[in-house]
Amino acid sequence: MRVVGTFHPSSSVSRSLKCRLSSDPALEHLVVAKTDRLEVFSLQPSGLKSECTTDMWGRIVGIQDVPSKTEGQSNLLVMIDHPDPRVVMMVYVVEGGVVSLVPGGSHSLADRAARQAEFVTDIQVDPTGQIAVASCYAGKLKVIKLEKGELGQAFDVSLPEINLLAFSFLYTSEEDRFTLALLHLNHMRQMQLLCRDVLLQDLELSAAHSNLLITTVLPERTFPSLDPPPLLVPIPPHSTGSEDDDEDETGPAHRGGVLVLGGRKVMFYEHATQDQQDTRKEKQRRLSKRLSSGMQSEIAKAKEKEKERESRKIKARATVKWPWSSVTAWCAVDEGCRRLLVGDTYGRLAMLAFGDDQVTLTLIPLGETSPATSLIYLSSQVLFVGSHFGDSQLLRIHPAPVGNISSDTLPIPKGITAVPPSALRSSISKGKGRADDSGDISARGGRVINTKGSFVEILHRYDNIAPILDAVLADVDGSGQVITSSGGRNSGSLRVIRTEADFQERARLEGLSGITDIWPVRPRFEDQAHTHLVVSTLRETLVFSFTGKDNLTHIEPSAAGLVTNVPTFALGNIPRRQTTVSGGRSISSYVDSPLVVQITPEGVHLVEFDTTLGSFSAVGQGWVPKKMGDASLAGKEVVAAAMSPSQFIVGLSGGRLALLNLSSGDALQLVKTRDFTDEICAISCTPFDPSKNYATSIAVSFWGSNRVSILSLDSPDSYLGPVCEVTLPALPRCVLLHNFGTGVRPKDMDFHPHLLVGLADGNVVTYAFRDGELLDRKVSSVGNAPASLSVCSVDGRTVVFASGARASVLYWDRQRVRSSPVSIKYMVKGVSLSTSAYPSCLAIATFSALLIGNVRGVDKMQIRTIPLGMDNPRKMAYHAEQQVFGVACVRASPGRIGDDEDITGSFKLLDGHSFSQLHHFQCNPDEEPSAVLALPGKGSGSTPAFCLGTVVIRPEEREPSHGRLVLFSLSSVDGSRLLSVLASQDVKGCVYALAHVAENVIAAAINTSVMLFKIRETALGDISPLALDKAAEWNHNHFVINLIWDGQYLLVGDAISSVSVLRVADDATRLESVARDYGPLWPVAIESTGNGIIGANSDCNLFSFTLQRGPQRSVLEKDGVYHIDDVVNKFIRGALSSADVSEDQAVKASHVFFTSTGRIGAILEIKDAMSLHMTALQRNMEKYIIGPGGVNHTKRRAPAAPRGHTDAEASYGFLDGDFLEGFLSYSRPEQLMEGDIEAERITLPLSTVKDLLVQMQSLH
């Protein structure tokens, strides 16, 4: 059984909206739809503030705000896409200070008999908020009445315009008149603009075209492309307030209309006048009379007349040339839509403005952004750009250029006349209708302004890794990371993704060597600010003072006041102990003091800080074993130590452990000792209750036996008594007792005491310390250097730093200890530090330096962007031995709509650490890279490192007929690593996929075939040192786009058919079919499971097969199917991270998958013993947890087909990990465990179920 979980949620923005969701009239909200969830932000003076996030259980394709019962407040109308289209009303609710979106009703749009809409799936609400219209099927619309923010009656209406491209409600002056502007492709492949009225009483659309907008055919030259379809923008009427507005055709007033965006021109079609509407109504009446006359001649004439009218081309009231590529998004800047912001597919942003003196259009370039899927003007020149191909952005639009002032704001292609910005001022000064020819103004023509510099300032970026076309898991610096080929158009990039904390360095002190520990020191025990920092090295102790604003001064040993000629094992501020007598009883208490305890190999020393002199001075004689006069202490020295504010634990040579404390006379006194057979290695004495000055338990580790013992400090009678112990596989170099929770007593819910052990081999072992036992052993690694542990504060929470060759932060989250890597190498110790210059910081010691800074985002995912701009990465591979990436890129030079794009291909060599470009290989003209393979071996000299597959694009060909295989190795010239071509082989088709089968044997998927090529050395004197010879071919498919070698078999994915398993002959001269699935699967990505295949198809389903081997023949048995509701482009065998690995883990990570919306997920395998229980738990949860709009989880995950979810089968072989993990936060888990009947009861203990779900969480 497999479990599907999410590591990184979808980050692609499909829609966004600004509205008022609360009753506060001064508060506005930004709603962002990211594929399958809604994120709500409030607009604050400081920026956007996240309010809530809601999963919608489906892909969001439309959101609109509708007026609610409360005046000035809106609800959200959300449309969900196929295979289960529906409309859901979401209501903004605040309860107990917690904000959420809750469903307020829904309507299903599903129709199994209808054909899905080809061009537009969206929902529109009329300007009055009374009705909504949804389009998701060809030839029909769903009309929904809206009543005070609630969904009312819904009904279907037939739509004669089958190929609908765009639709929008128009602004009408008549009450209860609802008119839809419709843009469609007619039977003659002409783009026609018309409108129809929604007749609520008749529950249908008007049979005849509405008269509000005169039907017109749009010029084909203006709209040469339908990818993407044009957009319709309704424009409300504009009036100057003059009585002559209706008669003045030269003024700025107009009757409202619609803008058509997406062509080589922006076109504004105005509403018809009342006289025009009356005339057209009369003509329609006469035409209807002829059609119903019964006379064939009259009917024929009427049809001919109707055809003539529908094919007419009406001149637009105003136009302006659009100089760039297809329009993808727009938004209004003001309520009257006098100014609009428009974005194209390559991120070019411009302002479209209506003229102040005439009905003309002016286009003003503003700058370049991410390719926009949505634009929302917020306020104060701030714009939100939602994107699918790049990062979403928060921008400020300035009235004057803010960068690149010497270059054009945006390129203006030849053939478009642009005027300088001064033309705007001159036309205003000339008055109404008086512009001359220099301004290029007419009643219908518009102007393009040629501005200089960028007017756009990026205020904030929101990481978006969509669309992911390829990905690799690479262990570059000892820690695994995901690298994705992301973005597109002008925002191509590689994304390096890892869950790690970000260290922000503020100061660094170099020149130190051999650092072993550090301690910050305060003037007094209860002070908050630190004034000194003590650093211990292998040979001595250094004392530093924070002086001035940000100076760190080394104090000379003679003036330090501390013991500096030897290393220090432990040091810290302590309170002073005082004893009072009350009622004949002596009562000890602790008060604030300037005392500091230092423990060195010599013994325990007590010093006092003088705030007047700013120095330390010794107090008393301390406790030095050699000077105590005790024969049993003769020759012993301190080898390990730890301390709490009132307890000092000293490990002496020979295996003796000593407990000391401070008497009321500031004297150190020995409380108890205990001898052990092994030498003491490390000690921990940390109170589980941070408000207490004493610990109740200590941990001691030993040399030789690798034991760790927990000893009691609970009462004088049990001091140093054994509690429990454990033996470890390597030396326990460091131990730490730590409470990860905020509770202080065992009965507290948030009391989580743990023992953490840092081993010499770089592993960190954690145990839960409950009821005197060490439980739930987990192991993680921080490299191959000895691991050390330290406690500090990060982002307001107490965490543990585990450090070795790498560093990690251990913290408590979701009922377990979680690990977050930190980008610091060979860290020794981390401590909290707060000074006047560095408040709330960390002091971190490495072997050779001292760092001061902050760690941010402990539980956040860090995404590093390597921008490639116009070079869009398609495929990539990582060569581990050379530590380089090979990235295949395609570059398209953006042009104007309808112009041919100049597309070039290249293969880039990037450094594995810095991602700087080392070299690149330019493909031939019309050639694009299509597949990349990293080959094993050293990858230099005559040994190939990469194989590149290409395709030659020829527009006249229906199927590619030419391509190439190119072998590269890496060579070094003057210290630079370059790509060297070892061999090039032409092939007859596109190389869709490559796989390494054996030494010098490569498999290639070329059009319909799978081919084997052998690499051989050529004779001396040949042009290329290597050659590729075709050794075998298997041609039994339609289009082979996936090829996986699992070590034994070659797995084949056919994009039109299904999957196959091939055997490669020992001499690689023959391919044999082993097993094949003959169903219409349409796979888009596959990967091996070891004994079968896992994959995803074009209907957004996951599937899996097991290869059943028999004596006669082998078969592929389908053992899993699951609707994931996303397009998976890549599977990789492996795990996302080296998280805690429990020795009895029931769940193991097997695969990672990547989708087109930026989702990264994990496929986990669960043991058979637990899979039945988890299946039963999911079944029980499905009865109580319903998605927004009443969506049932069983139906949601059932496999989908082009016409929706199938009723023939439910999902099987896969479990929804994200859904199951909701059990951990469910308020009544016992209810889910019991089920409705006895047969549904889950017999596992509740704690076991929770532990299993926590294990699942740890793996994604």
Image: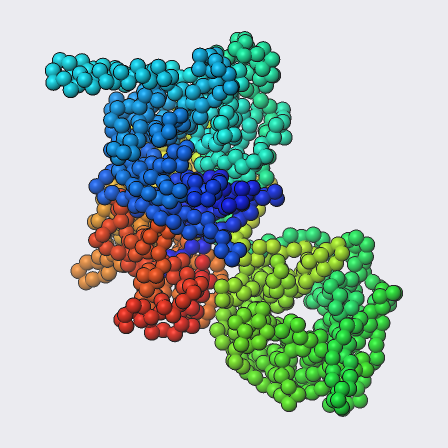
| Quadrant, the C terminus | bottom left
**Which image quadrant for residue 222?**
top left
Q: Position of residue 1254 (x, y in %)?
A: 45, 65
**In the displayed structure, does residue 452 sit left or right of residue 78?**
right
**In the displayed structure, does residue 904 sit left or right of residue 752?**
left
Work out whether residue 1203 or residue 359 is closer to the camera in this orientation and state it.
359
Residue at x-position 37% and y-position 44%: 150
**In the displayed structure, does residue 293 sit left or right of residue 368?**
left
| Quadrant, the N terminus | bottom left
Q: How many marks?
A: 0
Work out whether residue 508 or residue 667 is closer to the camera in this orientation and state it.
667
Single out the residue that lies furthest toward the right: 613
Q: Position of residue 848 (x, y in %)?
A: 70, 59
Residue at x-position 79% and y-position 53%: 549
Q: Position of residue 902 (x, y in %)?
A: 43, 27
Q: Is residue 414 visible?
A: no
Q: Is 451 located above or below residue 1074 in the figure?
A: above
Residue at x-position 63% and y-position 27%: 400
Q: Is 577 located above or below residue 427 in the figure?
A: below
Q: Position of residue 812 (x, y in %)?
A: 54, 65
Q: Is residue 325 visible?
A: yes
Residue at x-position 19% and y-position 58%: 1113
Colour setup of the view: rainbow
